[in-house]
């Protein structure tokens, strides 16, 4: 039979040995890794519409479709630039807003070319605008017309006033009320803010 001192030494060895082992079991570690991997994949997944544009880029390259290539490369470049900022493109709605900005630049360029008498450049910009229109129409993102927006805003203003919202807080309250109705839709928030001011008489 082992002596008391021998038993004490064995207990001390077992305690020190277990202390060096990680507390998290292998199963738990695998589960945590899987969750982290799933979360990262979900967060980093590109918008579905962007996937379509990338596929179209390859098709345009094979077909040597210069106008479409120019448009798609401009979108990809703008998306890459956005990825390096604090507001990367993560949703189809954000991507549509980006395309609208590119289209606005093309429209402004067409106006300038028209003023300079450069019909060749006007045609080039108009062609790109038509391609951008095609992509905006096929984005799958719902666009609200002015009449629909005005009706939603008016409804939100009336609800806010009935709730007793102070005049100085009306704008913020109305924008909050509109949040759910406008989520996932192609809207210009600056334009909406202007419409809220007009309809609220501010």
Image: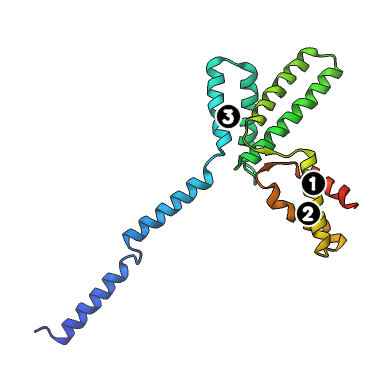
Compared to residue 2, the image places residue 98 above or below, namely above
Mark 1 residue element = helix
Residue at 85% in and 17% down: 116
Residue 134: name its quadrant.
top right
In the picture of the structure, the residue carrying the numbered disc 2 is 156
Name the mark nearer the viewer: 1 or 3. Answer: 1
Between disc 3 and disc 2, the foreground one is: 2
Q: Earlier in the sequence, mark 2 or mark 1?
A: 1
* Residue at (76% x, 38% y) in the render: 145
Between 190 and 83, the residue placed more toward the observer is 190
Q: In this picture, is 62 found above or below 72?
A: above
Badge 1 crowding class, 10 Å Cα cut-off, few under 14, some 14 to 19, many 20 or more, is few
Quadrant location, the N terminus:
bottom left
Query: Alpha-carbon distance for marks 1 and 3?
Result: 34 Å
Name the spot of residue 137 as percent of width and height, x first.
66, 30
**Quarter occupied by residue 57:** top right
Task: State if disc 3 and disc 1 touch (CB < 8 Å).
Answer: no
Q: CA distance from mark 3 to mark 2?
A: 36 Å
Residue named by callout 3: 53
Residue drawn at x 83%, y 49% is 196
Vertical side of 169 occupied by 196: above or below: above
The residue to which callout 1 is attached is: 151
């Amino acid at each position: 039979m082992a002596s008391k001192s021998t038993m004490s030494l064995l207990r001390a060895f077992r305690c020190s040995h277990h202390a060096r082992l990680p507390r998290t079991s292998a199963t738990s570690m695998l589960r945590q890794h899987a969750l982290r991997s799933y979360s990262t994949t979900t967060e980093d997944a590109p918008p579905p519409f962007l996937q379509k544009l990338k596929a179209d880029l390859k098709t345009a390259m094979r077909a040597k479709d210069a106008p479409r290539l120019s448009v798609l490369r401009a979108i990809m470049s703008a998306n890459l630039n956005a990825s390096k900022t604090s507001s990367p493109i993560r949703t189809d709605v954000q991507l549509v807003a980006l395309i609208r900005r590119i289209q606005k630049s093309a429209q402004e360029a067409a106006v300038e070319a028209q003023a300079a008498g450069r019909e060749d450049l006007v045609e080039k910009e108009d062609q790109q605008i038509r391609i951008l229109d095609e992509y905006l129409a096929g984005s799958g993102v719902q666009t609200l017309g002015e009449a629909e927006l005005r009706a939603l805003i008016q409804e939100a203003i009336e609800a806010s006033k009935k709730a007793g919202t102070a005049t100085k807080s009306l704008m913020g309250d109305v924008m909050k009320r509109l949040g759910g109705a406008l989520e996932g839709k192609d809207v210009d928030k600056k334009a909406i803010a202007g419409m809220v001011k007009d309809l609220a008489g501010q």
